[in-house]
Amino acid sequence: MKYVNLVLNTLFDVFLYPLGWLPPLWGLIFVSAVSGILMVMIFGKISDQEGIAVLRKRMTGEVLGILLNAGTPATVISFAARLIADNTRYLVMILKPMVVMAVPFMLLWGQLDARYGSAGLPGNQPVTITFQYAEEPPPTEENDFSVRNGGLIPPVMTVDTLKQVSFRIFSHGSRGVEILANDLRIPVGSIHEWNGSLVSRGFDTSPSLLSPFHPTVTVLDAGTETPDSGWYSFPDVDYRVMGWRWSWAAVFLVFSMAAAVVATGVLKIKV
Amino acid sequence: MKRMYSGAPLFILFLPVFVSVLHAYVGPGAGFGIVTSFMVILNAVLVSLLSLLLWPLNLAVRVLKRRRRKRKAVADRVVVLGLDGFSPEIAAELMEAGELPNLSYLSESGVLMELGTTCPGISPVAWSTFQTGVNPGKHGIFDFLAPDRKRYMALLSSVRTARVEKRRRFLPFARSRTVTEVKLLRRSTPFWNLLGKYGLRSIVLRVPITYPPEPLDGHILSGMCVPDLRGTQGSYTLFTENPPGAPITGGLWSPLTRSDDDTWTSVLPGPVDGNGVETTVNLKLSRSGGNFVLSVGEAVLTLVPGILSHWVELSFGNRGKMKCITKFNLDPGEDGSPRLYATALNIDPYSPSLPISHPVYFSKYIAGLQGPFATLGLAEDTWALNNGVIPEEIFLQQAWSIFDERRKMFFDALKRNGKGLVTCVFDTSDRIQHMFWSRGFGEGTPIREMYRKMDILVGDTLKRIKRNDMLIVMSDHGFTSFHGCVDLNRWLVEKGYMVLEEGISTVETAFKGVDWSRTRAWSMGLAGIMLNLKGREARGIVDPGPEAEEILAEITAGLLEIRDESGKRVVSSVYRSEEVYSGPYAEEAPDLIVGTSRGYRVGWNCVTGGVGDRVTYPNNKHWNGDHCHDHLLVPGILACNMKLADDPPDIVDIAPTILDALGMVPPSYMDGKSLLAKAGVR
């Protein structure tokens, strides 16, 4: 998975490179619009367009049947039943494209979440990091931590019952600063060192496609004191759109669907 | 469906609210699928609930609004199965041979008899009388064509289409806009409109002369006289590399340009847009093995020689707003040069550019449930067969596919409307007899096959009706042969009633070359002769009164003396309009209605104002059966599952009979009488 992510990250890096000069919102809108159009095109290619068109028309006929026979309850119910049955057929019909599209969508979702989901460590705002141990956490000292462009806010908390160690870090500067891979050096216990990237929210010892930038936990000397996993929570980034604060997912969904609506009209794809 | 799917943008607006539940979202395509699917269920449930909740209110309003029926109904529902041109003579012979068991059953359990038709026995006249219960003098339809007495032109008798300036109702100061106004010229009131006043719902399918559709309590799908997208009464398109030798009647020619050995391109001419520019759709034909692949508009289809394609949806105009459906047929050609045929551009029933139903979405409802269907008034392409553009098999495929479409909508209507009226007219019987009459109706002929299929239709209908239903199977007229033409204008010229300008001996059409200052009579349409009357015609020279009477008497006597080479009379009757018509519009009728003998009909060019070089001549066209003769020679048929009066019924009696059967007193203006009352059913 690590290598798959490496390839995907590189591909997305290359694809998104030209957008690097744009404010994140515009980059996100662009990516959303393009992905919306592409997904609709994929849907058009792999779905039974003729079948969908026929079914859509039949369902329209059934809705109109309800309107035309509003004074006859039995007919209304019969048309409503037919409509629901055809709706089920429609869902079955789009199942195949949904399954096929799930793969690119999953990749895209993970990448966008990683790239646009958080603003990194905000200036002078602390973020909490937690490590989970399999066994009792080793004793840790505050002086063992170092954060490039930032620092540690004492104390380091150890919760023996949960087998967790938590601490807070901050970045220097007034604006949000991305703390990238290798920025954070945290000795875990007395003999282990952990390297990681902190551009994502939450991490695990094994990265997944949905969390492509999960830090790789480098265990220099595996032992009982090695953390099993760890997580942190950077604040979500908000985007200002039409005076409202939108999450990256909302921006993506709205703009990808808006682009898709236009694409379905222009490309005459039945969805 | 647009309406249903228009929920998607609304949903998008609210997406930010639902972000937390969007993990199931898999891309916009499938996302729409899920969203719209959800909307459909919501829609179905809400509309059904609303409908059920409002039903008592709806029922109460209907009960309060409807008039009280003054008689006890003898039927809960009347089902009228109209078989255009179904001949009682042929039916009797085939029943005798045991080939029409369902009609025989009706004959035994109810009645089956001849039904008098109108004068003349032409579909628009007869079906107008059927629906209104009045003679043509009260509904104003006397022929397919009506004379424009100011311009000496032929106009369609039932519809007037005009471009009119309209002010915006809510924006009186805004610039007015030009719109196309379509007006139905049939007057009086169809009996189904009267049923609505008594709370009885009607479903009326493809009854001639119902375009544009009038509002009623129920649904109506217009029939004969619905135009195609080009605004004509049906014009096919022929695509060939070389131009046809002569102008083609009823169609257009579009050149096929060869791109390489196996590829041709062309354009399909469409309607004229709002700027007066003819719209087109590009077309590419490629040979692929034994078949041809046709790309037209956005459609790609494989054409198999000898098989008419399925309906193809096309859009014309800049924004593709003018939508139509058409079918294609391909003849590969012996010389390697294909002949491609496209049917008339039928108005797309799913997105109609013109009002072809009431409510307007009724055609969409039918198209949604059963797929596209022919909407053109005269949908079977008789001109294409007449001109040899399509072979007989293709014509028959077309005719029977239209029949199948009609049957589906008829049976759906029977299912949906349990009380009131269901009426459907099938034209296949008329078209097949027009085009195959000379073959007779022996074993294996298209006409015999058609009579059998119509009998099966009657049987299928009988299975679908209930005990208290009244089934009426009827035709508007019968049929007879049309092997010879009589050119009434030529006869008028020869007898000196019509005078052509100096140096002109024949007229192709529209009376071009007629000297109106010396013409006393003119003929136009399938049976009419008009005097060039002072004060009525633009350049009339005949004084009303004695002079007019004298000329009419002379013409009548003269027409009855026309004989063919064998000495047989060509004209068997001539009626003065006042003899056969009464009512406020009787004055609009031709002065004389000419009834030709069996075998003869008014000549092709004469109908539209042409003058040929002979009074009688053979009819060499494929269209060799007809009913535009002396109306007494071509009665229709009437069969019913209830006993009716056995004195000769007439088509004008059908409307009062239906009203009577449903418990209403027929209005006094109706000319017909209830056959129930006569039969003593009451």
Image (tube, coloured by chain):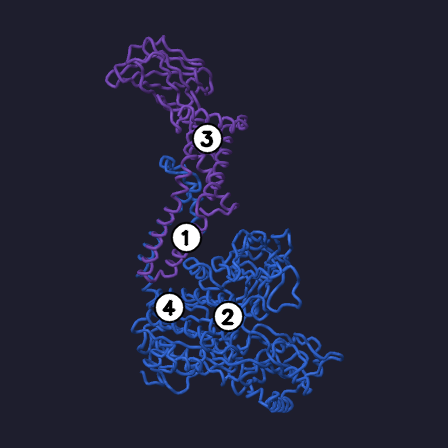
Chain colours: A purple, B blue
The mark lying in front, picked from 4 and 3, is 4
SS assignment at label 3 = strand
Q: Residue at x 50, y 70 (%)?
A: B224
Residue B398 at x, y percent in the picture: 49, 65
Q: Residues within 10 Å of mark 4 (few under 14, many from 20)?
A: many
**A266 left or right, relative to B410:** right
**B163 left or right, relative to B350:** right
Residue A191 at x, y percent in the picture: 33, 9
Q: CA distance from mark 1 to mark 4?
A: 29 Å
Q: Earlier in the sequence, mark 1 or mark 3?
A: 1
SS assignment at label 2 = loop
User: From where the camera sits, is residue B533 visible?
Assistant: no
Q: Residues within 10 Å of mark 2 (few under 14, many from 20)?
A: many
Which residue is tagged 3? A239
The numbered dot on residue B239 is: none
Q: How many marks do you count on the picture? A: 4
Give yes or no for contact between labels 1 and 2 (Cβ–Cβ under 8 Å).
no
Which residue is tagged 4? B201
Q: CA distance from mark 1 to mark 3?
A: 39 Å
Residue B242 at x, y percent in the picture: 66, 61
Q: CA distance from mark 2 to mark 3?
A: 61 Å
Which residue is tagged 1? A55
The numbered dot on residue B224 is: 2
Give yes or no for contact between labels 1 and 3 (Cβ–Cβ under 8 Å).
no
Q: Residues within 10 Å of mark 1 (few under 14, many from 20)?
A: many
Give yes or no for contact between labels 2 and 3 (Cβ–Cβ under 8 Å).
no
Q: Is residue B588 above or below residue B381?
A: below
Q: Is residue B451 above or below residue B6?
A: below
Q: Chain of mark 3?
A: A
